[in-house]
């Protein structure tokens, strides 16, 4: 059974950047305002995330790494919302099957913190009291030590670090209310944003002043197809070798090849040859309109009225680009 669980877990956590995405979402769900990420060897040796969120209650530490354990069901309006991204309570469980996992955490109401270590979904020993501030530190070591082939198939630590950095950068832009820090162990931060900053400020800090100064902003609320869009985009992006698309749907980082293709088509008309745009989009949809069959690793999403919504977005972007040319 352990082997089967490990294989299933390996499907969910395919590389360090996937694990980080899950952990970032947990820290954000826990209302953190500061999130620090520490990395060794592209996250393969160490991936550690520290937040100042709500923390985990001592009595929950024994079950957080069991499959389908989630504290998030009560706050969902209905079952469709639970199913929004197709799974719940699988991230920590999966990670504990493919790495050494430990959690140090303290809630506001407990007098001290607790530290617990896990393997294959189970607590290894009772949580030990420890000092610490409110919040949670999740430490993942030796990712894929249970799956040597997976480990071999991964790219170099430098490339894995790049993917980690990409994910963190995108969450930092989307969440300007939160301060983020990313560092390689023992080095100065390679990425840092302040809490209570703005998206534009974060784009400037992370993607560069050349991009930030070209940004155009717009938002759109659509009654007919029930979506809300917030968008920051450039006509060109002087510094980039390829286009950059940050797409969040209902606050989750996702991919939509249909939307990407539509944007490429619009930009093809307006973009000087060899230039690449920067596009940030945050799309809010009624949760029940999102495809519930989306697998956690297949961040490719589908949604109801997809063609119509993408057509509207295309028109909006086109109008913006046209306006800036006039
Ligand atoms: P899910 O996020 O779908 O609930 P996870 O496996 O990602 O499932 O996490 C399991 C549970 O562990 C969460 O529901 C939450 O209660 C708790 N948890 C995980 N990370 C944190 C964190 N950084 N701060 C507070 N609670 C956390
Ligand atoms: Mg989670």
Image (cartoon, rainbow, N blue to C red):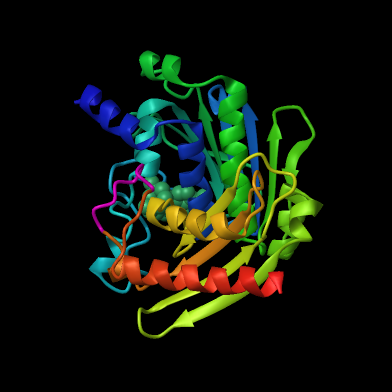
Q: Which of 27 and 64 is in front in this view?
A: 27
- Image quadrant containing the C terminus: bottom right
- Picture residue at 32% right of the left edge, 52% below the top: 88
74 within the magenta span:
no
- Secondary structure mostly seen in the magenta stretch: loop
- Dividing the picture into quadrants, the one containing residue 7 is top left
Extent of the magenta region:
292-299
- Picture residue at 66% right of the left edge, 75% below the top: 323
Q: In this view, does 203 lie to the left or right of 79?
A: right
- Image quadrant containing the N terminus: top left
Q: In this view, does 242 lie to the left or right of 309?
A: right
Q: Position of residue 257 (x, y in %)?
A: 40, 50
Q: Could one spot residue 122 in this view of the protein?
A: yes
- Name above or below for residue 259 compared with residue 166: below
Q: In this view, does 205 lie to the left or right of 30?
A: right
Q: Position of residue 94 (x, y in %)?
A: 35, 36
Q: Position of residue 265 (x, y in %)?
A: 48, 56
- Picture residue at 74% right of the left edge, 52% below the top: 193
- Dividing the picture into quadrants, the one containing residue 95 is top left
Q: Which residue lies furthest to the bottom in this view?
A: 223
- Name above or below for residue 205 compared with residue 283: above
Q: Which of 24 and 125 is in front in this view?
A: 24
Q: Position of residue 255 (x, y in %)?
A: 43, 51
């Amino acid at each position: 059974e352990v082997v089967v669980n490990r294989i299933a877990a390996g499907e969910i956590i395919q590389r360090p950047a996937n694990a980080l995405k899950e952990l970032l979402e947990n820290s954000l769900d826990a209302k953190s305002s500061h999130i620090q990420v520490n990395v060794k060897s592209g996250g393969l040796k160490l991936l550690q995330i520290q937040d100042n969120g709500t923390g985990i209650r001592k009595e929950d530490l024994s079950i957080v790494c069991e499959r389908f354990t989630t504290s998030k069901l009560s706050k969902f309006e209905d079952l469709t919302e639970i199913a929004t991204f197709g799974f719940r309570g699988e991230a920590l469980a999966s990670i504990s099957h493919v790495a050494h996992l430990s959690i140090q955490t303290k809630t506001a109401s407990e007098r001290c913190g607790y530290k617990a270590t896990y393997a294959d979904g189970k607590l290894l020993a009772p949580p030990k009291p420890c000092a610490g501030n409110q919040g949670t530190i999740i430490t993942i070591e030796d990712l894929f030590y249970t799956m040597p082939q997976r480990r071999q198939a991964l790219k170099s630590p430098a490339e894995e670090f790049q993917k980690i950095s990409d994910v963190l950068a995108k969450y930092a832009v989307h969440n300007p209310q939160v301060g983020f820090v990313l560092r390689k162990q023992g080095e100065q931060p390679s990425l840092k944003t302040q809490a209570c900053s703005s998206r534009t400020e974060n784009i400037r800090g992370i993607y560069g002043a050349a991009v930030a100064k070209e940004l155009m902003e717009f938002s759109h609320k659509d009654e007919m197809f029930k979506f809300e869009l917030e968008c920051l985009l450039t006509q060109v992006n002087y510094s980039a070798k390829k286009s950059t698309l940050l797409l969040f749907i209902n606050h989750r980082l996702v991919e939509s090849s249909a939307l990407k293709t539509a944007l490429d088509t619009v930009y093809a008309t307006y973009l000087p040859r060899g230039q690449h745009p920067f596009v940030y989009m945050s799309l809010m949809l009624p949760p029940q309109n999102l495809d519930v069959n989306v697998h956690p690793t297949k961040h490719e999403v589908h949604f109801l009225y997809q063609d119509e919504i993408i057509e509207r977005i295309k028109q909006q972007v086109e109008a913006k680009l046209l306006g800036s040319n006039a």
